[in-house]
Image: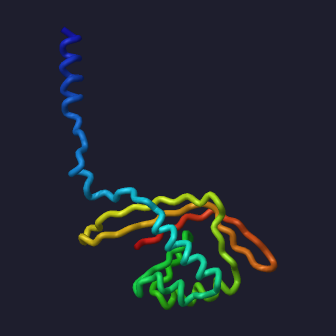
Amino acid sequence: MKKIFLTLILSFAILSCETPNEESNSDLPTVIDDTELVAIADAMYEAMNSDDVDSVLNFYADEASWSFPNGVNIEGKEAIGQMLATTTSIWNITREEGTNYLALEGTNESGEDFKVLLSWGGQTFSNVDTSITVPYHNILFF
């Protein structure tokens, strides 16, 4: 009798598990080929390392923001340009070989389509006097 009850309970437990279907996950971003987004990020880094802040800013919307891990946020294209002008005058910034990428696309709560490029790895800041390599993570929204 105990085996019958155990079998019934396990059967109900298994049957009550909800199997996700494609419709229930449709609001989640999907992984896409990162080639196009990595090319855009590479072009942005090239412009940055050429001290061409105006070209870098062409990649940004007027309402763009730049957030640092320490909680400092820079709001607006003009403010980002000022920060980049200072930074690129001091440092040459390169991403290390072996940078990892993940590209996603989806639709936000407002119904707008978006693409995101996540990247992480080593990043080197160098100038005539010094070179510092630090782990970094970056999220670019398109």
- Colour convention of the picture: rainbow
Which residue is painted at 51% across and 60% down in the image?
Answer: 101
Q: Quadrant of residue 136?
A: bottom right
Of residue 96 and residue 130, the one placed in the foreground of this image is: 96
Please provide percent x and percent y for residue 47.
Answer: 59, 82
Which residue is painted at 47% across and 59% down in the image?
Answer: 102
Which residue is painted at 46% across and 71% down in the image?
Answer: 140
- Count how many numbered circles sit on residues in the image: 0
Of residue 6 and residue 40, the one placed in the foreground of this image is: 40
Of residue 110 and residue 96, the one placed in the foreground of this image is: 96
Which residue is painted at 24% across and 49% down in the image?
Answer: 22
Please provide percent x and percent y for residue 126.
Answer: 73, 75
Q: Quadrant of residue 122?
A: bottom right
Q: Residue furthest right?
A: 129
Q: Classify residue 107 as left or right of residue 115.
A: left
State which quarter of the image contains the N terminus: top left
Please provide percent x and percent y for residue 108.
Answer: 29, 67
State which quarter of the image contains the C terminus: bottom left
Please provide percent x and percent y for residue 16.
Answer: 19, 33
Answer above or below: position of 39 versus 55: above
Q: Classify residue 36 as left or right of residue 44.
A: left
